Image (cartoon, grey):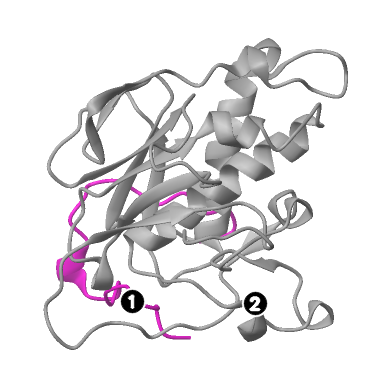
Amino acid sequence: MIGGCGQDFTDVSALRLLLTTECEGQDVAGTQAADLVLLDWDGGTSPLYPSISLDPLDLALFETSDGGTLADRADEFKERVRGQVTRIFCDFPEASIRVDHAGQERNRNTTVVHLAQIVSPHGGAQIGEGEYDPCNQYHDDAAVIFGEQILRLGGPRMLDDWVLMFANVTAHEIGHMVGFGHIQRGQQPEASRSLYVELMLDGHTIDELKSEQRFVVPQDNCPKTDSTARRCSHNPVADWTRGE
């Protein structure tokens, strides 16, 4: 399987961060990650919207089916989202990525995903937006997950469902940032032929957002000429207008 629009991660020159990967069942001792992605839960500003102050994700607004909210299990929720994003990329060895929570020192090679309590400044139904980085030319891309828009998809939900929804959207945006484009629904295998929902689908139903997602369809979109990053916005439901 070709690493989509991503660079050849077997090239030692691409392994620029002194961080070990984190994949269960694999001998990763001494293996370096090509990209460090930090999940920022605390708000602030993003290069995508430098004039907007992003409010932190308000976990107290997300009701759980046991009568509580995500705020009651905030640390567990955040770590499970991080862990699920890690598992998605561990199942996809073409991309070598380390996912951590923000708080580490950031440098010019750090990609940051803000999970914020905001609706898309563009309006519409987008639940995430990130830079589309063909061939993974840059290692300091940015994305924003629009928590308020995810909240509007309804609840209460089981904790497991909230984890999968946030993790899948986050992993989808990271997919764009390492160079993967959208997959049209007709390109994915029939459900009986795949254990997972295609992560990069150009439109997910709510049930698909709550399902295990992975990179399923091979991509080889790498442009033959230099190109610059552009944004990809992410709508949640297949029958809505969407361009992640």
How far apart, in angstroms, are the residues tagged by discs 2 and 1?
19 Å
Image vertical order of residue 188 relative to residue 151, above or below: below
The percent coordinates of residue 16 (x first, y second) are 17, 56
> Label 1: how many residues lie within 10 Å, few (<14), some (14-19) or many (20+)?
many
> Decide: marks 2, 1 in contact (CB < 8 A)?
no
**Residue wearing tag 2:** 185
Q: Residue furthest right?
A: 66
Q: Position of residue 77 (x, y in %)?
A: 63, 26
In the image, taking residue 231 as reference, residue 214 lies left or right, namely: right
Find disc 1 in the rendering and name its residue.
5
Could you tell me which residue is drawn at 50 percent across and 21 percent down?
A: 57
Query: Which span of residues is magenta-colored?
Result: 1-26
Q: Report if residue 50 lies within the magenta region.
A: no
Counting labels gives 2
Instruction: Look at the picture and state if 207 lies above or below 105.
Output: below
Q: Amino acid at mark 1?
A: Cys
Q: Position of residue 204 (x, y in %)?
A: 66, 60
Marks 2 and 1, the one that precedes in the sequence? 1
Which of 25/215 is in front?
215
Q: Which residue is pictured at 79% across the width and 22% down the height? A: 64
Q: Is residue 236 left or right of residue 29?
A: right
Classify mark 1: helix, strand or loop.
Answer: loop
Q: Residue at x 35, y 28 (%)?
A: 102
Does the rendering let one see residue 30? Answer: no
Q: Position of residue 218 (x, y in %)?
A: 51, 83
From where the camera sits, is residue 183 visible? yes
Q: Residue at x 76, y 37 (%)?
A: 160
Q: Quadrant of residue 39?
A: top left
Which picture quadrant has residue 159? top right
Q: Quick check: 125 left or right of 197?
A: left
Tag 2: amino acid: Arg
